[in-house]
Amino acid sequence: MAEKTLNTFEIVQQQIKEACDALGETQEVYEILKQPQSCLEVSIPVRMDNGELKIFEGYRSLHNDAVGPGKGGVRFHQNVSRDEVKALSAWMTFKCGIAGIPYGGGKGGIVVDPRDLSQGEVERMSRAYIKAIAPVIGEKVDIPAPDVNTTPQIMAWMVDEYSMLQGKNTPAVITGKPLEFGGSLARFEATGYGVALMMREAFKAKGKEMKGSKVAVQGFGNVGRFAALYAEQLGAKVVAISDVSCCLYNEKGLDVKALFDYVTIPENKNMIKGFKGADAEYDRNKVFEMDVDLFSPCALENAITTETVNKIKADIIVEGANGPTTPEADKVINEKGIFLVPDILSNGGGVMVSYFEWVQNLQNYYWSFEEVQEKQEVKMVKAFDDIYALKEKHNVTMRVAAFMMAIKRVADAMRVRGWVK
Ligand code: NAD
């Protein structure tokens, strides 16, 4: 039976309510946080290659800027809607609160399937979108970034357009830029690296050694690949990796770097199937059943359901993907006593290094790869420790504690600013 699905905006409002109640927060705090501060709807005129003028619908939502300017991606997708953008901007407020970075939440999008557009049309649409939302963004106001179907190249066009409108160079208005134009080193690796760091902290919290432990990773895209690579570097044996094509298993641990090289061979089409360094190649869903210490879903949302959760043997789960666990499966995880590090904490490395990119742009001084990773490690470990302490204090799950931490940060800022009692 299909599990109950809520509209994303309803889910986020429910999460805010639960966290406010757990914290004993005032009704005023809930009333402010349950809606974004503003959500701008724009029409975006684009001259198409065939000479026609087409009007696209776009949004930019600023959820809350009590802690600092808004921060959040821009997605180009046919399913973008006002409600989705509002929900995602709220999640960004919490993600930034959890990461301990001085931002609020923002999100934007255009209702479009970019596969239907030429490169020139995408560029003109990106520039027209920035022109339309220029009054509500800015280096100290709201800072967009890439999201679904938007790339560093698109960010470069957007910054170029915004800089022309301002009559000055403004690289810090958008993050996720190419390295040649103000991007940060270690940004590409950041999300997966952060997931691996959270694996290490989870092992520590459980009183277990990561060195020699057995790990299974679902997904071998940007997140899964670097999560697996850094997990291996931190001493784990990554015995199972899956992607859309299959699940690979090697009792002694897969050679992740060799698998990286394998998937980048053009005829392998970015897929792991056929890799020679495995003892066995199974159906992709076998990854849930592996006899491992830690399972990390890094592929897509709703991967852990009431059906798959009962196959999991690991006693630690570190979420790399966004929303990989359904609420019903989450309950089973808690009942079974599996220690889970929630997505909102464990995949926050990307937004953290976006923050570092912004800091570097504002200073016009750039850090080395190692400096960025060191700073990421310090911040992520602190976030884990703070959330773990809150979890222990209130006897709640890591997921609830993470939301409580985020809401507390925003509520405290709103209170000292005099917005709420
Ligand atoms: P990606 O498209 O690069 O990779 C997705 C991977 O999942 C691919 O290897 C694909 O083969 C695999 N996959 C798809 N369906 C599968 C299935 N049924 N079983 C097993 N594997 C399957 O995406 P990504 O950038 O790695 O993002 C993965 C998840 O992490 C998404 O939920 C995304 O929203 C989230 N996320 C990504 C970032 C980031 O910086 N890239 C940051 C935060 C969160």
Image (spheres, grey):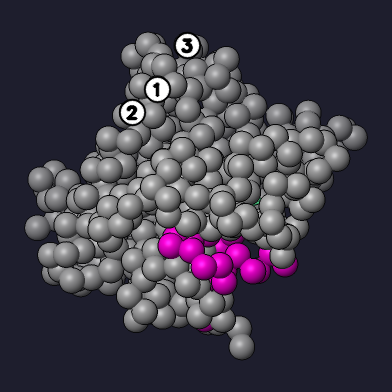
In what element is the residue under mark 2?
helix
The answer to which of 145 and 367 lies nearer the viewer is 367
Relative height, residue 242 to residue 157 (above, below): below
Instruction: Quadrant for the C terminus, please.
Output: bottom left
Residue at the image point whose x is 41% and y is 80% from the top: 332
Whether the residues at callouts 2 and 1 have beta carbons within 8 Å, the answer is yes
Magenta stretch: residue 299 in it? yes
Distance from disc 3 to disc 1, alpha carbons, whole Å, reads 31 Å
Distance from disc 2 to disc 3, alpha carbons, whole Å, reads 32 Å
Magenta stretch: residue 101 in it? no
Q: Mark 2 vs ligand 1: CB under 8 Å?
A: no
Residue 154 seen in the figure:
yes
As drawn, the label of residue 370 is 1
Mark 3 or 1: the one toward you: 1
Which three-letter amino acid code belongs to the residue tagged 2? Glu
Is tag 2's residue or tag 3's residue first in the polypeptide sequence? Answer: 3
Distance from disc 2 to disc 1, alpha carbons, whole Å, reads 6 Å
Whether the residues at callouts 3 and 1 have beta carbons within 8 Å, the answer is no
Could you tell me residue 339's position as x and y percent?
34, 66
Q: Magenta segment range? A: 283-306
Which three-letter amino acid code belongs to the residue tagged 3? Lys
Which residue is tagged 2?
374
Residue 87 seen in the figure:
no
Residue at the image point whose x is 26% and y is 46% from the top: 383
The answer to which of 22 and 299 lies nearer the viewer is 299
Residue at the image point whose x is 50% and y is 80% from the top: 310
Q: Is residue 351 left or right of residue 114?
A: left
Q: Tell me if mark 2 has few (under 14), some (14-19) or many (20+) residues whose alpha carbon lies within 10 angstroms of its own.
A: few
